[in-house]
Amino acid sequence: MTIATNREHLDFGASEGSRWTGVAKQVIDAAGTTRQLLVGESGALCIFSTVAGQIYNLPLIGADDIGMWFEFAITVSGTSNSYTINTNAANFLSGGIVATSTTPGDEDVFTGDNATDTALTLDADVDGRLGGGMFKLTAVSLTKWTIGGFTVTTPAALDPFS
């Protein structure tokens, strides 16, 4: 299922807000391949579900695309290759993720640098490819995706941004 790029507005501006019922989120599974995400898929939950690794490429941010977002969930611990999310040369990562260790008290925080980081690469247990992690990326400008969430790591976590 692809969500239309001509998005429907649910709110008419009343102070009471609006109600959104009967909605199901689109779930995308790259199934061990490289998957180019589309602007029209904004709001989808993208899952990492194969031990052999998966790659998601975020769409280029256009003027009408600021505010699009994608959620990611690691449902299976990777054992080879990596779980990767790529932007492109014109878009960078900002924000941060909490690396939650399997050893209590050994947590860390890593952040995108806003200027050179174009990928989140979870290619080892120490940088977050263990099952259970969840994070969200939102396009906040023509050049920037911001990330928030957490990964699950083994002790002595490493920075997954590159």
Image (cartoon, rainbow, N blue to C red):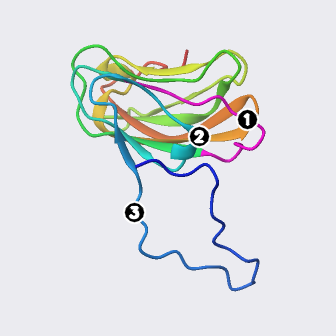
Q: What residue sits right under mark 1 in the picture?
A: 62
- The picture places residue 22, in percent across and down from the top left corner, at 41, 74
| Badge 2 vs badge 1, beta-carbon distance below 8 Å | yes
- The quadrant where residue 18 appears: bottom right
Whole-percent x and y of residue 161?
A: 53, 20
Q: Is residue 54 above or below residue 100?
A: above
Q: Amino acid at mark 3?
A: Ala
> Which mark is first along the chain, 1 or 3?
3
Residue for point 60% across, 19% down: 118
Give the percent coordinates (x, y) of residue 129: 32, 27
Residue drawn where x is 76% and y is 77% of the image = 13
Please tell me the numbered disc located at residue 24.
3
Find out whether residue 57 is within the magenta segment: yes
Kindly report the distance in space between the C-alpha atoms of the residues bearing marks 2 and 3: 18 Å
Rendered residue at 67%/80% (across/down): 17
| Residue closer to the observer: 93 or 86 | 86
